Amino acid sequence: MFGKGILKGLMVTGKEAASKRLTEKYPEEKPNLPDRWRGGSFALDKEACINCGLCAMACPNKVIRQKFEKDEENKKICTEFVMDRQYCLYCGLCVEACPKGCLHFTQDFETAVYLASDVPQDLLADGNMEAPRSKYGEKPPLPKPVITPKPAAPAAPAASAAKVEEGGDK
Amino acid sequence: MQNLNVNSERYTLNMGPQHPSTHGVLRIVADFDGETCVSADPQIGYLHRGMEKLLESRTYVQGMPYTDRLDYLAGVNNNLPYALAVEKLLGVEIPERASLLRMLSCEIMRLASYMVGIGIYIMDLGAVSAVFYPYQQREYALEVMSALCGARMTQGYIRFGGVQADWNEQCDAALQKLLDEFPPFLEMYHKLVDENEIFLHRTKGVGVVTAEQAKAYGLTGANLRASGVSYDLRRDAPYCLYDRFKFKVPVQQAGDCHARYVQRMEECEVIYQLIKDIYAALKETEGGEIMGKVPKVLRVPAGEAYAQTENPKGIMGCMVASDGKTNPLRVHFRRPSFDNIAIYSELMPGHKMADLVTIIASFDIVLGEIDA
């Protein structure tokens, strides 16, 4: 009989129409974002940042605008750290490049603004650290080293601390 | 061509670039004699972004996020040939777990891409509700990718030497959801579409591509296999660790638009089984390395390398030429959709206007890839 297949299909549609709703009622119901969400805005831990500029170097699209100056103690300080988000691909290479893990994505997603000038995000003025943070780019904790009975163990953290100071001086 | 119908008028019709059924910005300049197409000429370039040039001006690693934008329906699958080509030059060894993660993410996105391919195909023939059911499944697949690497579509998950992130519990939960929901969906969809008389009338015997034609025009992927040529790179020239897995390569003999639909539906089952197998293998390598030994600043040795993979749309190839600097000298992509549409100008003449829509939809093209 012609039309049997159509009726069979319509039965499926009817059954599906009466099934449970799968969509989220968005403004009332917030989406459940995964831990490693990337997108939205950035967060910067200004205290932890060592002004190395690796994030800007990793960026494929020159999104990160940075300026550095030397202060009176000849220490490198950052005077500008702006994320030009209008060019951002959200590839996450900057977050991965950060050696100190101080640059993060946030779990924000409602980032629409009224003015185009509000799109670039000035991370020096506002580090945005109170926003819920994404776990993207977080390295898994290194496996605990096998304990070797040597006095070299306490010397290792001292050496790494010296390195940090050195990096900060540059 | 001779005007057979004396009462009809010959005219040229521009289909696209803003036509909803051209899958983006494809433009087809077709000559019609009444309702019948006498010649068709696909025009491309409306989505050209200069991808290959962009990659030349960036470092190797920085180029990776751009490859996602080629076939944007399956981002990870485009990363893979680029990564494989550069790794050939670097000569690095990929850890087992990383290879499995690459394969798993590629198969998940292949499924997601097929869901669009099937759904939009049916929608172009007028069945709008049939597009939403596959999109639900695609949503589950995208949730897995989003849990794995944070992005739903332009993932950029693959890195030179391995992958960006390891599998976690959230991915487990998301993948389990996909694995649970997919078989009932497939059964339901077969019921919904397979016997629909309108669908059968509009697709059977339309746009027949013979095996010789398919090979001559360089068709690849599901479009080639629907014409009776059993060729799948995953089986015939395995990359990653595909040689470890046994899977069926379905083939159709008819070569018409209906065969291309059946082909995709059959391949979905194979992909589903493959996802399960790879996932089981991945579970055995728990705690393994996900990155090979690759220097932080990549200086790729001078030379040329070519790698190809089986993408959802066909065979994707990537040629990388290096002169030893931090950025590539030249990158070129063989984009499957670009080669697949070349047959249009031979296939379309003789068909009616509405059949042109069927033919375009049945090839499952994506314009990001055609125009690069």
Image (cartoon, coloured by chain):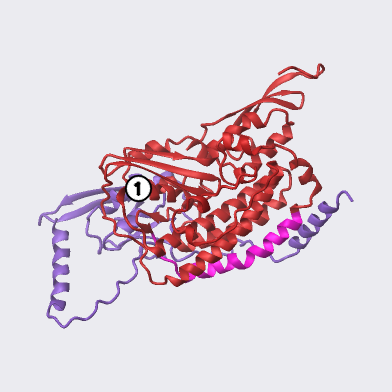
Q: Is residue B9 magenta?
A: no
Chain label for disc 1: B
Counting from the top left corner in percent of width and height, residue A9 is at 79, 55
* Residue B12 in sight in this render: yes
Amino acid at dot 1:
Val
Q: Residue furthest left?
A: A73
Counting from the top left corner in percent of width and height, residue A148 is at 18, 81
Q: Bounds of the magenta span?
A: B164-192
Q: Is residue B181 magenta?
A: yes
Query: Which of the pair B365/B81 is nearer the observer?
Result: B81
Q: Main secondary structure of the magenta part?
A: helix
How many circles with numbers are drawn on the protein? 1
- As drawn, B180 above or below A97: below
The quadrant of the picture occupied by the N terminus of chain B is top right
Q: Residue furthest bottom?
A: A149
Chain seen in red:
B
Residue A128: name its quadrant.
bottom left
Residue B112: name its quadrant.
bottom right
Chain seen in purple:
A
Query: Which of the pair A110/A161 is nearer the observer?
Result: A161
Counting from the top left corner in percent of width and height, residue B61 is at 34, 49
Query: Which of the pair B208/A10 is nearer the observer?
Result: B208
* Residue A86 in sight in this render: no
Disc 1 element: helix
Counting from the top left corner in percent of width and height, residue B214 is at 60, 37
Q: Which residue is mark 1?
A: B86
Residue drawn where x is 75% and y is 60% of the image: A17
